[in-house]
Image: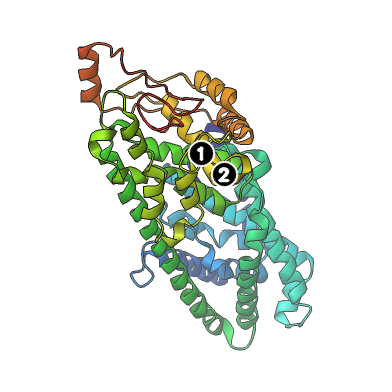
Amino acid sequence: MGPVRPWGYVYVGCAALAALFCVAPVPELPLPWWAVALLAVLYAGCAQVPRCSLVGRHAPDGMGTFFPVLLAGAFLLPPPAAALVPLPGALLARVEGRPARLRRIWRAAQLALAVWAASRVHWSLGGHDAVVGPRFPYALLPAGAAVVAFCLALTALDGGILALAEGVPAHTAWRGLFLRSLAPVTVHGLAGLMMAVLWRSTYGPVAALLVLLPMYISCWVFAQYHRERAAHQATIRALVQAVDIKDGYTRGHSERVGQASMMIARELGMDDERVEVLRFAGILHDVGKLGVPTRLLRKDGPLTPEERRIIELHPEYGHEMVRGIGFLDEARSAILHHHERLDGSGYPYGLTGDRIPECARVVAVADAFDAMTSTRSYRRARPVAAALDELQRCAGSQFDPAMVRAFVRALARQGWHPVVTADEERREGAREAGPRGNVPAPALPVAGRPAGRGPGGGGA
């Protein structure tokens, strides 16, 4: 869950009320409370595994590694009691981001509703008797249906929170969620079924706990993946900070281009993996400036043709700098080609139309937009509406019209809050020195190559 919009609070509140409604019949049921408590403690303990030094602290909050405990509860307990199992663990789990209390309530409500749905389907198909038997292979049928119900509930709730709380387009919020969750949850469902069968057997609950050992190992492997991912993020942050230090005029520009690129990618319906690639590409699109002399990046006056040719080498420098970083993959082509133009007047290779990689066409729009809506020492920011008009005017010649339309739609829903990126002291000094009539500095040159400050395409 990202930054929460007002409708997100309403959505979480409705989910919490629905979860309370599901557990309301519990006092009227004759339950083995020791079993409910044991499963709840097991899940709460498993939710703390990411804090364990053996696993590491890089596994994501609320990870589903121990869904087997929840699904075992769905197979063993009536639906209202099964919905109680995830509550202590979800409410006590560590969360990142604010508001922490809201995020815990959301996670608890989401899991309670999903487990309730799974248990309801399982019991309605006679799964309880099949587990006690056990009756194989019939026991697999209600268990499989329960897994599907569990995935559908998580998908419906996740898509809703993406659409209402984070502003993800409705036609993309649910895309791919069910299929991505079905395979891993099916594996967890089999482990949960094994736990339930052992629990009901003569070996008892102690034998059922043995199923958690291989799941703990899978958690450790999962944590290693996220530790590597955290290292990737640290690498990117270091590169971006180096660029910001060298070119103070565009401080913060890279992160905003990454955000705008991600908005366009989501609007185009790209899957999460490609959205992440586009974010990396936007963040690192100017990393090649590390190979450009600082005096040129900070020059206040117009660039000579020779100086411009040197600056126009920065996409190639950037491509070479990240060539050995395997996880960037497609982002490398965006770094190399984000100053190409559809009409062939861009650089470094003068590619035209669809020969320009799709990711580069996305970053080109994001880069130009942020350059126009950010104040620099050599010119003031344009209003968002004026920047969008300029993007649309240049669509088809400089920018891909599909990317421009996607960005316009995304901005209509989410808005944009440009940040002043110029170095304050240099900007104040420029104001005191008076206007520079010899620095045209067009924010978005549209024909040929610009004669003013910064490389073509508005990327500064």
**Residue 375 point in image, percent of width and height:** 36, 23
Q: How is colour applied across the structure in the image?
A: rainbow
Question: Residue 91 or 3: which is nearer the viewer?
Answer: 3
Given contact means CB atoms under 8 Å apart, are the residues at marks 1 and 2 in contact? yes
Mark 1 element type: loop
Mark 2 burial class by Cα count in 10 Å: few <14, some 14-19, many 20+: many
**Residue 285 point in image, percent of width and height:** 42, 43
**Residue 394 point in image, percent of width and height:** 57, 26
Q: Which mark is residue 340?
A: 1
Mark 2 element type: loop
Rendered image quadrant of residue 99: top left
- Amino acid carrying label 1: it is Glu
Q: Eyeballing the image, is 54 above or below 373?
A: below
Q: Is residue 352 left or right of residue 281?
A: right
- Amino acid carrying label 2: it is Ile
**Residue 104 point in image, percent of width and height:** 47, 50
Q: Real-space Cα distance between discs 1 and 2?
A: 7 Å
Q: Which mark is residue 356?
A: 2
Residue plotted at (59% across, 88% down): 203
Q: Which of marks 1 and 2 is nearer the N terminus?
A: 1
Residue plotted at (75% across, 70% down): 142
